[in-house]
Amino acid sequence: MPQLSLEAVHDTLFAWCRQHNFAGHDPFDALNSRLFQATPLSRFRTPRLLFTQLTKRSPLNLRAVTRVPPQKNAKGIALFALAALADHRRNATVETELITRELLSELLRLKIKGYAGAAWGYNFDWQSRNFFAPHGTPTIVPTAFAARALIEAFDAFHDQQYLEVARSICDFILKDLNRPVDTGEELCFSYSPNDDTRIFNASLFAAETLAAVGARTNETSYCELAIRAARFVIRHQNKDGSWTYGTGEQQQWIDNFHTAYVLSSLFRIGKGCYTDDAEIMKALGDGYDFWSKSFFLADGWPKYYHDQLHPADSHAAATAIVTLTELRELDDGALPLAEKIAAWTIDNLRDASGYFYYQRRRLFTVRTPFMRWTQAWMVYALARLLEEKQRLKGNADS
């Protein structure tokens, strides 16, 4: 059977997602179970956490049995919009603009009301090891990806409405998020208005948004805040270049995609604030060196943890591809590594019908087609890789 081209894999996956109306299940949506919610267990932290992890880790998709409905996820829609924008930049047509604007309209429809500015959250109650976020709670991660999509849409279409909403997100960040650290030199933003966690990638997502908006509205105070937030994360970097998930006792793991988030946000803060701050650049270089050498095998296998072979995770693969395309100027080998990761993931985690599996574990593969965690990220990753390959080919031909 002839190997499909990267473009064919991308197109087939995007078509599969559109056929499902960009709605599906999520690794963390177990608490949407109508059966679980009907029990007293739904009111307590430990049962919520155990039920979420059981449903997430099962090799079988238990959601039909436990009555978890497929739904749209705001972060997933933002990722699909980012993928559509990359496709539009690569080959702008009336159709690519229409698809992109439809996704952006859906994203705006999913905004959470009642806060100082525009914000988004997850479509399920979420019990993490650190806190509980009920459905309808705005959190910075989906909000920051919405900001990315809106800012890129403003750049592509010069439509002021997108920048206005992105500017409103800054009001949410500055007025609704807590600041567990706020000194003259350092700043840390919370994950949501309801917690005081010190999670590195989450705080940087807030900072990245401020930097990107400030670069377009000429609000220099946003960059000052973003750089202070970057400094907080940089000064918690480990000697080997790595970062743990956060500062808490239960946040001391190191994984692939959260490291990629930190690297990407630090890079975007530097770009948005037009700074080559020596402290930021050194931390970025050391972090990239650790990440690129610790999380990928020679054949492109994407490890979830730096010190364990399994699981191989499609989400980790996709975030790596996106990060490598963005950080290509730091390393001539970044794009070849992204292509290698894409090839491995297509060969090992892609279903014949076009979607991607969740994880390859030591004894089995979890084939559940999670819409936000896997499909949206893979569409985005493949779109960005195709865009970057075309850009480099155009430079070589000119």
Image (tube, rainbow, N blue to C red):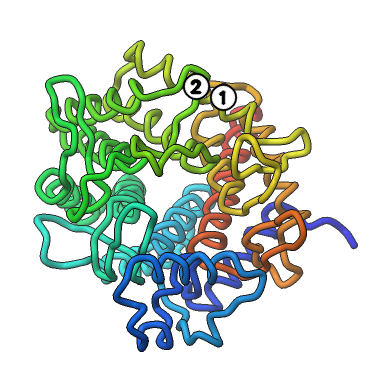
Residue 241 is tagged as 2
Q: Residue at x 74, y 47 (%)?
A: 343
Asked which secondary structure carries label 2, the reply is loop
* Amino acid at circle 1: Phe
Whether residue 332 can be seen here: yes
Q: Position of residue 69 (x, y in %)?
A: 45, 83
Is 275 situated above or below 335?
above
Q: Splitting the image into 4 quarters, where does residue 228 fall?
A: top left
Near-viewer residue (319 or 100): 319
Is 158 situated above or below 78?
above
Quadrant of the image for the C terminus? top right
Q: Position of residue 377 (x, y in %)?
A: 52, 55
Near-viewer residue (246 or 289): 246
Is 324 situated above or below 12?
above
Is 99 situated above or below 311?
below
Q: Residue at x 62, y 52 (%)?
A: 313
Local crowd at mark 1 within 10 Å, few (<14), some, or many (≥20)? some
Q: Decide if residue 291 is on the left or right side of residue 151.
A: right
Q: Decide if residue 259 is on the left or right side of residue 213.
A: right
Asked which secondary structure carries label 1, the reply is helix
Residue 290 is tagged as 1
Residue 169 is tagged as none
Q: How many numbered discs sit on the rendered protein?
A: 2
* Amino acid at circle 2: Gly
Q: Position of residue 198 (x, y in %)?
A: 28, 39
Near-viewer residue (204 or 37): 37
Whether residue 398 can be seen here: no
Q: CA distance from mark 2 to mark 1?
A: 6 Å
Quadrant of the image for the N terminus? bottom right
Q: Residue at x 16, y 37 (%)?
A: 217
Q: Decide if residue 385 is on the left or right side of residue 207.
A: right
Mark 2–mark 1 CB contact (< 8 Å): yes
